[in-house]
Image: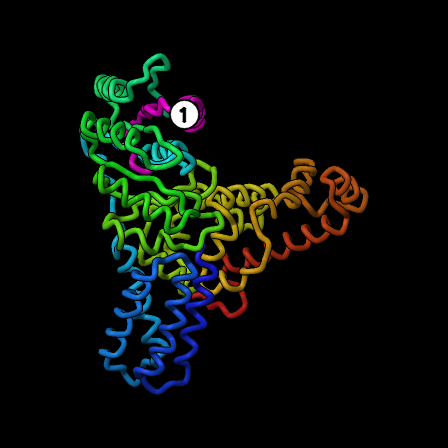
Amino acid sequence: MFENLSERIERSFKILKGEGKITEINIAEALKDIRRALLDADVSYKIAKQFCDEVKQKALGQNVLTAVKPQQMIVKIVHDELAALMGSEHSEINVKGNPAVVLVAGLNGSGKTTFSGKLALNIRSKRGMKVMLAACDTFRPAAIDQLKVLGEQIGVPVYSETDVKDPVKIAGNAIAKAKAEGYSVVIVDTAGRLAVDQELMDEISALKEAVKPTETLFVVDAMTGQDAVETAKAFNDRLDFDGVVLTKMDGDTRGGAALSIKAVVGKPIKFVSSGEKMEALDIFYPARIADRILGMGDVVSLVEKAQEQFDEKQARELKKKLAKNQFTLMDFYNQIQQIKKMGNIKDLASMIPGMGKALKDVDMDNDSFKGIEAIILSMTPGEREHPEIINGSRRKRIADGSGTTIQEVNRLLKQFEGTRSMMKSVMTGNFPGMRRR
């Protein structure tokens, strides 16, 4: 997401390169490009114009310091305005109550049920709270079964009543059961429709009135652009929800919904969801998204994702192995699995400043590891522990077993040995250019 927008905005900044100061003429030319970039990203004309007017007003009102170039100043102003457009600060979900009730609404196909499962896992794993899912979508036949499958996958119970068609009754019974059994949070998955209609609005309004949720979230498909914004507005006018969830952020989306929804609806984006993995749910941080749009990366989010997957005990053991040059191919394999759990590898790489642009046309995903994994798993335990014993005949057997070539096996072994030597040097302080203190 945002790749095209990032490229277009970056190009517009170059108009100010070499300029001694910001003037009406050069800022107008740069902002014309930025406005076009926003329109191409499916941001409405009104919001794009308001955004550019704000940037222009602030840019012309700035006393540019001699140490700061006009191009650097406009980047800073655009960054701050992008963050403000998306809500400035991140907004927390309210899960206080006995139990707290989170009502999840949205149209069919928006990823509402999958999000309910992701949110349940997120609250349980990150907040340590006891969560129950309530299957209140009695309109779509497979919705209850889908939620049960997700619940079983993440180890969260699902309350359902297959013979009852009244979602208000099901939700009430689910909350009563949760309270009696000591659950802290109940997430209510509601029915959707293919489009906004009066029947849907009446049903969801009645459900909200009955269960009095501590948090009401509206789920929208980010790929629908301005349609997502208009749908959110229609729901908010009736429901007065607390926040928005953008799903399918890994799809072919230009980013218009993320950039517009706060300005139009007046409610914050609280979560973004991408992919089918249940761990793939992130808090929406406007400033971090602005960083990524402007090619500055998102190192903070990258570190947070790493911390979620790597525990301190494993890190200490790995450090000892590296220092003693005992890092094995199986350790290497295990590290790949940890990295894959963090999310899509190209998305992760784009969080490193400058890498998003460098990898724009590179075909990279988690399947890129398949060849390496197959080679390692085709080795015997002894070969993984002591790769130096892998001679010519062993290399042929490994290549045949993994469906690769001897050249690919040789390349992996060479890369692994180089990586192990470098890591040992770093750990012991003998890396070229490093000085021990």
Mark 1, other Cα within 10 Å: few <14 / some 14–19 / many ≥20: few
Secondary structure of the residue carrying tag 1 is loop
Based on the picture, tell me whether residue 143 belongs to the magenta stretch. yes
Residue in front for this viewpoint, 102 or 396: 102
Quadrant in the picture for the N terminus: bottom left
Question: Horizontal and vertical percent for residue 357?
Answer: 50, 64
The percent position of residue 106, horizontal first and vertical second, equals 34, 36
Q: Amino acid at mark 1?
A: Arg
| Residue 204 included in the magenta stretch of the image | no
Q: Residue 115 sits in which quadrant? A: top left
Q: Residue furthest front?
A: 198
* Spot occupied by residue 302 in the image (x, y as percentages of width and height): 41, 52
Quarter of the image where one finds residue 211: top left
The residue under the point 27% across, 65% down is 50
> Which residue is at 58% across, 52% downward?
364
Tell me what residue is drawn at x 38 percent, y 75 percent: 30
Q: Is 171 placed left or right of 116 in the picture?
A: left
**Left or right of residue 72, residue 404 in this image:** right
Of residues 128 and 108, the one nearer the viewer is: 108
Question: Can you give x and y, in whole percent of width and height, for residue 253 in the image?
Answer: 45, 51
Residue at (47, 47) in percent of width and height: 250
The correct choice, above or below, for 73 with respect to 94 in the image is: below
**Magenta-drawn segment:** 126-155
Residue 190 vertical position relative to residue 353 in the rendered view, above or below: above
> Does residue 73 show up?
yes
Q: Which residue is mark 1?
A: 140
**Colour pattern of the rendering:** rainbow
Quarter of the picture holding the C terminus: bottom left
Out of 321 and 195, give the one closest to the viewer.
Answer: 195
Residue that extends furthest to the bottom in the rendered view of this protein: 20
Residue 181 seen in the figure: no
Judge by depth and name the residue closer to the eye, 410 or 271.
271
